[in-house]
Image (spheres, grey):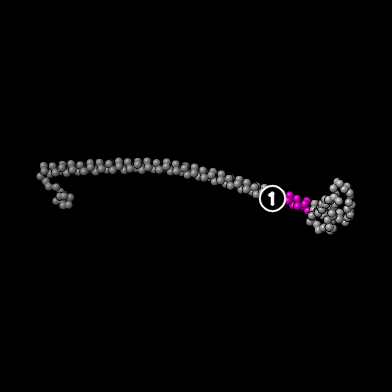
Amino acid sequence: MTVEETNTVEVESECPPHDPPVAIAIKTDEEKAIVPVEPRVHAEKPAEVCEEKQKEAFINRVAMEKKESLIKAWEESEKSKSENKAQQKLSSIKAWENSKKAELEAKLKKIEEDLEIKKAKYIEKMKNKVVLVHKTAEEKRAITEAKCREDILKAEEVATKLRATGGTPKKLLGWFKS
């Protein structure tokens, strides 16, 4: 007798097997004998149903994965849109802030320039007033000195007249009357 090679094929599935697996005997070319396998009509239907359930489960899983990937892509897209929108809003706020700062700095510079001009004018006015005060003081000094010299000349003239006439002054040191 020759050695026979026998292979057993088992189908694993999620469905519980209704019938035990079918054993198929395969003989080598030397024997060329055909071994009939008992046809099981009931074994075919549950296997087909089980294959259909497996296909349906696979299709459902693929559909679920597709939905999940679509949801994930949509979520990423929405996040990206939101971030871009926020970034655009932040950049517009920054631009607005910079323009307002520049505007206020320009106003401040103009005010500083105006104040510098006013300060220069005020300093000029004050210098003019100081010059005017100095001029007035000089005039008053000159008037006072002229009056003093005039009073001294007058006193000398009166003293000379009194010596020439031999009279006495009516006022003595300005306190006593004669």
**Residue shown at 25% from the left, 43% from the top:** 141
Residue 42 visible from this viewpoint: yes
Q: In the rendered view, does 28 fall on the left or right side of 83?
A: right
Q: Say which of 108 and 142 sits in front.
A: 108
Which residue shows up at 78% across the image and 51% down it? 59
For the point 88% across and 47% down, the residue is 32
Q: Secondary structure at mark 1?
A: helix
Q: Residues within 10 Å of mark 1 (few under 14, many from 20)?
A: few
Q: Residue furthest front?
A: 1
Left or right? Give the position of 162 relative to 90. Answer: left
Left or right: 96 in relation to 13: left
* Percent x, y of residue 12: 79, 55
Q: How many marks?
A: 1
Taking depth in this image into account, of 151 and 92 the one nearest to the observer is 92
Q: Position of residue 82 (x, y in %)?
A: 64, 49
Q: Residue 124: horizontal and vertical position, in percent?
A: 37, 41
Residue visible at 60% across and 46% down in the picture: 87
Magenta region, main secondary structure: helix
Q: Is residue 56 part of the magenta span, yes or no?
A: no
Question: Is 86 positioned to the left or the right of 105 in the image?
Answer: right
Q: Is residue 73 magenta?
A: yes
Residue 51 is at least partly visible in this image:
no
User: Can you identify the residue that label 1 sits on?
Assistant: 72
Residue in the foreground of this view, choosing between 159 and 80? 80
Which image quadrant is residue 16 in?
bottom right
Q: Is residue 37 above or below residue 145?
A: below
Q: Magenta segment, which residues?
A: 57-74
* Identity, as a three-letter code, of the amino acid under mark 1: Lys
Q: Where does residue 42 sit, x and y in percent of width and height?
A: 88, 56
